[in-house]
Amino acid sequence: MSTPSLDALREAIPRSCFDRSTLGSFAYLLRDVIYAALLVYLAVKIDFIPVRSVRVAAWIIYGVLQGFVGTGLWIIGHECGHAAFSPSTIINNTTGWLVHSSLMVPYFSWKITHARHHRYTGHMEKDVVFVPRLHQEGKPPSRFTHLFHLAEDTPAYTLLHLLGHQLMGWQIYLLFNITAGKNSLPKNGNRRQLLPNESHFDPSSALFTPSQRGQIMLSDLGLVVMASLLWRLGSAIGFGRVALLYGMPYLWVHHWLVAITYLHHTHPFVPHLSETAWSFTEGALCTVDRNFGFVGRHFFHEIIDYHVVHHLFPKIPFYKAEEATRAIMPLLGPLYRQEKQRSFLGSLYSTYRACDSAADADGSGVVQWVLSKQ
């Protein structure tokens, strides 16, 4: 079937779905802050538990739960970056800067590159996240390369590589802009330097234009303030305690960010598109809605469940995304991609194992995954 136009999809959605309630958004933010404060209040009592094994278990549970809450807060900041939190630009940017800085995320820096991801979703050259590497066919590999490829096929290698992907992927992306397309940098960006510089933290990075320098510096200021607060807290209560209270949830938050983004835009049977086949709507529809049960619906504000419509109309607030999705599903038919029956974490492993490289096999511009491992 032909792809409906963006205007046709917009007309199918009730106009109320585009209304942004500042008060309603702040209510969700307040709820998440209360959750975080309550968990910290309970966590400071963990050391009074006399049994060591129970203390360890309690800290692990705290880290997981606070990671859920922190991810929800990150998503609130993400809403601010899309102007979906409030009709007010000042409220959006002030709230987003405060929330993301508290999570050690450079708000404006990431907002700028994330907007480029939305502008070119699914584009093989211009998207900025999880662009697949092209499958290379040619001369037979050397013996060493052959042995390495054999190791790559083992579940143990996949699991080890996936752990690194989840633990360090977010930080490496912010530092080096990995997984971005080769033509994803802005044409009017800062001048290239002797060494590649695609850091989200450097105002002179090639990711940004000279006019955006002030925003990057403001993002960095937020990180410096937060780091200073953590340092003062560590000096007062001990850095080990700060690592437990803040460091563990920090790692969980970044694990969930990487997993959510990866699975939204990676699926064995969902393609990426070259310049000749890509359009904004076609690219946005290369997004996959998934399911993470109660955690996804309550803590993650349904970002996993209803992300396709978010890529089509990013100013729709998350609490209207389900209604908007149901409104466009009849128009999209099989073009609406979802995989809500499978386990989210199970899909993370199987997708990471299967989706290694992609190829435009028939020259149509539709780049499909080469599924060598399933």
Image (tube, rainbow, N blue to C red):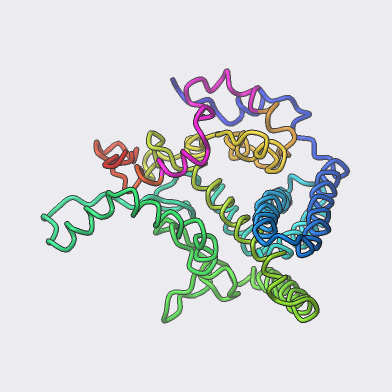
User: Which quadrant, please, contains the C terminus?
Assistant: top left
Vertical placement of 121 versus 111: above or below? above
- Outermost residue on the right side: it is 23
Task: State the image quarter where residue 322 is shown.
Answer: top right
Q: Is residue 75 visible?
A: no
Residue 323: image location, x then y, percent: 70, 26
Q: Nearer the viewer, residue 146 or 51?
A: 51
Q: Indicate yes or no whether the magenta region holds residue 328.
A: yes
Whole-percent x, y for residue 315 in the image: 70, 42
Q: Quadrant of residue 222?
A: bottom right
Q: Main secondary structure of the magenta part?
A: helix
Q: Nearer the viewer, residue 28 or 295?
A: 295
Give the answer, above or below, for where 120 lies relative to 192.
above
Q: Position of residue 216 (x, y in %)?
A: 65, 70
Q: Is residue 216 left or right of residue 271?
A: right
Magenta residues?
Answer: 325-351
Residue 17 visible in the displayed image:
yes
